[in-house]
Image (spheres, helix red, strand yellow):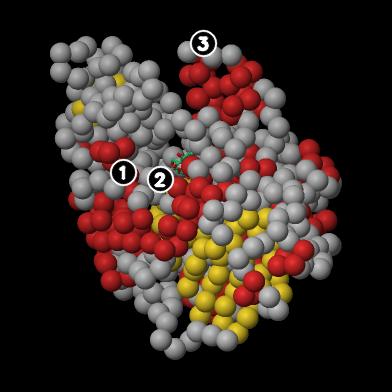
Amino acid sequence: MSGVETRWWRDAVVYQIYPRSFADSDGDGIGDVRGILAHLGHLEALGIDVVWLSPIYRSPQDDNGYDVSDYRDVDPMFGTLADLDELIAAVHDRGMKLVLDLVVNHTSDAHPWFMESRSSPSAAKRDWYWWRPPRAGMAAGVPGAEPTNWRSFFSGPAWELDDVSGEYYLHLFSRRQPDLNWEQPAVRAEVYSMMSWWLDRGVDGFRMDVINMISKDPDLPDGPVLGSGPYGDGSRAYLVGPRNHEFVQEMHREVFAHRDGRTMTVGEMPGVSIEDGRLFTDPARGELDMVFQFEHVDVDHGSGKWDPRPLELRDLKATLGRWQAGLADVGWNSLYWCNHDQPRVVSRWGDDGEHRIRSATMLATILHLHRGTPYVYQGEELGMTNVAFTSIEEFRDIEARNHYASAVGRGHDPAAVLTAMAPMHRDNARTPMQWDDSPHAAFTTGTPWIAVNPNFTTINGAAARADEASVFHHYRRLIDLRHTSDVVVHGDFEMRLADHPDVYAFTRTLGRESLLVLGNFSAAVQPIDGLEDWAGADVLLANTPAPDPLRAGLAPWEAVVLRRVG
Ligand code: TEU
């Protein structure tokens, strides 16, 4: 394609695997690397180009692996380094690539680095983490004596007191995930060396966990108090901190610059702005290939994720439209509805009952036809739904369990807390992959570490693969379209019908070729006005047998892609 800058991941589709929940090969109830090896055919049939593995490193699993105690080894529950080498080779043999999850904003408190750092205030690695004395004039351990008032993402203070030294260490996530101090050059050198080690082993890139939190304002200022307190929002001091771009540029120079563009990087960045998104993904700046921004997955949050609100489609269109426009001339977008931290999109913004297949395929069509690289989260291609947990005992996720304990501890009604958590908790995404209708959905021959969604008897891979009208085959068609159509990859994006409360409409244009993409986010027929100039266009793809949107309107949850040339 002449005249258009192209990097291989721009026309790729990425599939995210959450190893704990994908496939268990040894009957211990926990997914593993050999389980993934046994199901590569499923990914190949889908047509995806890149596999992203959530963490498989040695870890006490306080946050399901996002707490690493050895970056250069595989946790025995997931298998061995040899298993992973075999997986890398098998993925490559099928013409796909494999990226790992890089979790270097923090380590596990069981990592030898932290063990040494904690051993004494004079330890050589003391400043590899953020240690501070109690707030001036306050005794250690007294509420409010924490060095800053920051709240952790997993409830409670972001500082943990170490009785041995009487000092506190910083942990933006759980107290068993101490934050690394990237101000320390030796920390950065160790991280870059580890990353190069994996790339030399055949890994094709990294998804980087909260990589916009690695630079903190060294003054560590307090943040505005949240709600009725006592903790505050420290994000201004650690989201895209003063040296974030400098560190990511250094990483690019040290790890990626000499690898001829064969690698792919995507930075997970809660709270990142479009302006920073442009800076991080501008190829001329040598930082990252893509970022995961969060605006669209926060669009139905009231005061926070535990205060869910119904989707206002215009708000969703507005934020995705801004990012499409914002990165139209520089940088590149990632496109996702789902991952291991987000609820299942068909339950969230579709209809996971009567119209499950129709709404899931509509949501997929809308996402995959935007300009950017799509990410499919395991089970999304099957239209898997949220799970209806009825007691806190069924939950496994530290974020949910901590929130429940903290809310009930502050006197909230347990049942009301569970109800508020139901649509948004992360375990919705973490129930085992539903391969077929045999026991435990063929995820394991043992006892699953988390309950299998009981709807596996009807919603599963075997049933979907056998049904041409299934969600699975619609994803396959979308991925095939991206591989065969330059306008899908490179076409300019233009939002249409921005004020329509129930219809998502936009065009993609490349040269003389244009596509009109329409999606109905409601169970009612939606007449289409203002697009008459598309009358007579060809139907390129639809999730209904006989679409006629411009005359008959869009059917409930219908998606249609029209094409015209000239
Ligand atoms: O997530 C960071 C992040 O933004 C989420 O914690 C988010 O705030 C929350 O899930 C929304 O409910 C990354 C990983 O994706 C997540 O699984 C880890 O728990 C977290 O970092 C810490 O490593």
Tell me where residue 123 appears, x and y as whole percent: 20, 34
Lower position in the chain sequence, tag 2 or tag 3: 2
Please state which amino acid type lies under the numbered disc 1. Answer: Leu
Please state which amino acid type lies under the numbered disc 3. Answer: Gly
Q: Identify whether 208 is placed above or below 233.
A: below
**In the depicted view, which residue is nearer to us: 498 or 173?**
498
Identify the residue shown where x is 43% and y is 52%: 293
Q: Which residue is mark 1?
A: 239
Tell me where residue 240 appears, x and y as whole percent: 29, 48
Q: CA distance from mark 2 to mark 1?
A: 8 Å
Whether the residue under disc 3 has CB within 8 Å of ligand 1: no
Quadrant in the picture for the C terminus: bottom right
Element class at badge 1: loop
Identify the residue shown where x is 47% and y is 73%: 492
Q: Which residue is mark 2?
A: 270
Q: Which residue is mark 3?
A: 411
Whether the residue under disc 2 has CB within 8 Å of ligand 1: yes
Q: Is residue 391 left or right of residue 257?
A: right
Q: CA distance from mark 2 to mark 3?
A: 30 Å
Lower position in the chain sequence, tag 2 or tag 1: 1
